[in-house]
Image (cartoon, rainbow, N blue to C red):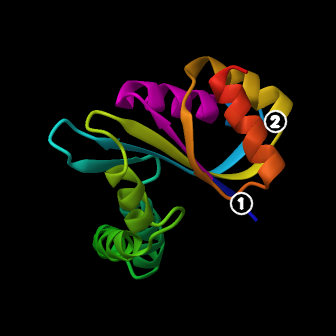
Amino acid sequence: MSDLIAVAYPDKHTAEEVRDRLLKLTTERVIELEDAVVVDRDENGRVKLHQVHNPAARGAMGGALWGGLIGFLFLAPLLGMAIGAAAGGASGAMVDVGVNDDFMRELGNKLPNGGAALIVLVRKITPDKVLPEISQYGGEVMQTSLDDESEERLREVLQGT
């Protein structure tokens, strides 16, 4: 089961830096992320979601591959790829994986104008390796599904206490 963690930052740039740092740590295998989204609220109060994974693009690529293979069997690989890409893209756009978009927009509406948040779904983590890497960025815990002890530890690390 994955844990949800939402941390607010003063600006989009800081939230993106933390996200990028966490993504780098996934290559070191000290954290496994199911989803990582930067939510920012611009100066006009509009909330935007910046997702790492694009389900429509992933579906289109998969559909093109399968369509090409099927098309190859029937001597029309280009037509098969085109149909497969369209079908895959459409199905990928309809699938919402990771954190629910409505939930993220709701959290985004709680941010001050110009503020941002990083929302992650964490499958697995080695806290003593990850927390020191993100402590320098600060941040305020908005919401988590962590147990009370883990959430308090995260708050302390982010506040530098």
- Residue 119 in view: yes
Q: Secondary structure at mark 2?
A: helix
- Amino acid type indicated by mark 2: Pro
Estimate the x, y position of residue 117 in percent, counting from the top left: 45, 41
Q: Give the number of marks.
A: 2
Indicate left or right for 57 with 44 as reference.
Answer: right
Mark 1 residue type? Ser
Work out which residue is located at the far bottom of the displayed protein and give it. 74
What residue is disc 2 on? 127
How many other residues sit within 10 Å of disc 2, few (<14), some (14-19) or many (≥20)? some
User: Which element carries disc 1, helix, strand or loop?
Assistant: loop
Whether 19 is among the magenta residues is: yes
Answer left or right for 103 relative to 19: left
Q: Which residue is depicted at the point 30% across and 76% down?
A: 83
**View extreme (left): residue:** 44
Decide which of tag 2 and tag 1 comes sooner along the chain: 1
> Whole-percent x and y of residue 34?
63, 55
Q: Taking 3 as reference, is 13 above or below it?
A: above
Span of residues in magenta: 5-24
Looking at the image, residue 40 lies above or below residue 28: below
Q: Residue at x 37, y 28 (%)?
A: 11
State the residue position of label 1: 2
The quadrant in which the C terminus is found is top right
Q: Residue at x 54, y 30 (%)?
A: 139
Where in the figure is residue 96, as x and y percent of width and height?
45, 70
**3 drawn magenta:** no
**In the image, 35: left or right of 122?**
left
Q: Is residue 145 above or below residue 36?
A: below
Q: Is residue 127 left or right of residue 18?
A: right
